[in-house]
């Protein structure tokens, strides 16, 4: 099972990788970064969610999630950290 440190690193790695692949300028990553201001669009975030599901074996948006998309990067990471527990 993934640790919170490895989940954070995995999320960060996928954000950076998708930004490069989609030729997006990624804002500096910090927990208080608002995802809408990250430089990634909805397609990028969908790709990241799909890749995280492949990597972690969980999609927190379909398994008991309340339906609201996380606002900040910290919220996004916490959602995955909670889902893998």
Image (cartoon, rainbow, N blue to C red):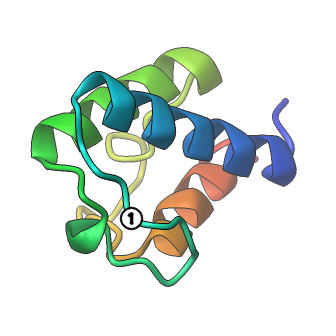
Task: Give neighbour class at mark 1: few <14, some 14-19, many 20+ (Cα, 10 Å).
Answer: some
Q: Residue at x 84, y 51 (%)?
A: 5
Image coords of residue 58 (percent x, y):
53, 30
The percent coordinates of residue 78 (x first, y second) are 60, 65
Instruction: Determine the residue positioned at 24% across, 43% down.
Output: 24
Note whether 13 is above or below 40 in the view shown: above
Q: Position of residue 61 (x, y in %)?
A: 34, 46
* Residue lying furthest top: 54
The residue positioned 68% from the left and 54% from the top of the image is: 81
Q: Secondary structure at mark 1?
A: loop
Residue extending farthest bottom = 32
Residue name at image x 57 percent, y 43 percent:
11
Can you say which quadrant of the picture contains the N terminus? top right
Looking at the image, residue 24 sits to the left or right of residue 81; the answer is left
Asked if residue 4 lies left or right of residue 23, the reply is right
Residue 85 versus residue 31: which sits nearer the camera?
31
User: Which residue is under mark 1?
Assistant: 27
* Image-based side of 64 in relation to 36, left or right: right
- Seen in the picture, residue 35 relative to 13 is either above or below; the reply is below
Judge whether 30 appears above or below 64 on screen: below
Total marks shown come to 1
In this rendering, is residue 59 above or below 69?
above
- In the rendered image, residue 7, in percent from the top left (x then y), is placed at 71, 44
Residue 48, image quadrant: top left
């Amino acid at each position: 099972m993934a640790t919170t440190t490895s989940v954070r690193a995995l999320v960060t790695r996928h954000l950076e990788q998708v930004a490069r692949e989609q030729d997006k300028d990624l804002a500096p990553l910090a927990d208080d970064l608002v995802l809408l201001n990250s430089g990634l669009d909805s397609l990028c975030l969908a790709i990241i969610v799909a890749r995280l599901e492949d990597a972690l074996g969980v999609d927190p948006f379909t398994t008991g999630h309340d339906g609201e998309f996380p606002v900040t990067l910290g919220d996004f990471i916490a959602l995955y950290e909670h889902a893998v527990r």
